[in-house]
Amino acid sequence: SSELNLTLHFDQEPQNVVAVRGKPLVLQCAASSSTPGPVNISWTQDDEPLELVNDSRRYILRNGSLFFKKVLSKRSGPSHDGFSDQGVYRCLVRNSVGALVSRSAQLRIA
């Protein structure tokens, strides 16, 4: 419905990016709503919700963008759990009226 598009829309959507391991990175996302009330922004990586509650390395900035203090990539070896930030990210916005999903952004590690 066109009414929904008027109430909630993206001002910025994430873009494909090549990140440098160990360096900070921001994936842009900003949304606005013409209805009063909060706009909730969350992120997915490879279609899985990002759990950021106890994550000091990655967090959502006030405008909704996703900030990485330092990008991780898979390393083989016993000391590393094989975690990687590489993948496909999407930004999800919700308010009292509805929800929108951003375009997908590919994060590759140089």
Image (cartoon, rainbow, N blue to C red):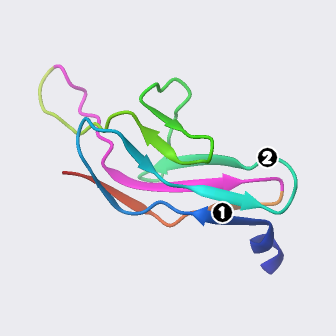
Label 2 vs label 1: CA separation? Answer: 14 Å
- Classify residue 57 by image quadrant: top left
Q: Is residue 21 left or right of residue 8?
A: left
Q: Amino acid at mark 1?
A: Leu
- The stretch in magenta equals 79-96
Going 25% across and 27% down the picture, which residue do you hit? 81
Q: Residue 87 got which mark?
A: none
Closer to viewer: mark 2 or mark 1: 2
Q: Residues within 10 Å of mark 1 (few under 14, many from 20)?
A: some
In this rendering, is residue 23 above or below 37? above
Q: Secondary structure at mark 1?
A: strand
Q: Is residue 106 left or right of residue 97?
A: left
Comparing 31 with 101, the one in front is 31
| Residues at marks 2 and 1 touching, judged by CB atoms closer than 8 Å | no
Residue 25 painted magenta: no
In this rendering, is residue 13 above or below 36? below
Comparing 45 with 69, the one in front is 69
Going 83% across and 63% down the picture, which residue do you hit? 34
- The residue indicated by pointer 2 is 38
Q: Amino acid at mark 2?
A: Pro
- The residue indicated by pointer 1 is 100
Going 11% across and 26% down the picture, which residue do you hit? 77
Looking at the image, the residue that sits furthest to the right is 36
Q: Is residue 81 left or right of residue 39?
A: left
Q: Is residue 14 visible?
A: yes
Looking at the image, the residue that sits furthest to the top is 79
Quadrant (top left, top right, bottom left, bottom right) of the N terminus:
bottom right
User: x, y percentage for residue 30?
Assistant: 61, 56
Residue 95 painted magenta: yes
User: x, y percentage for residue 102?
Assistant: 55, 63
- Classify residue 21 by image quadrant: top left
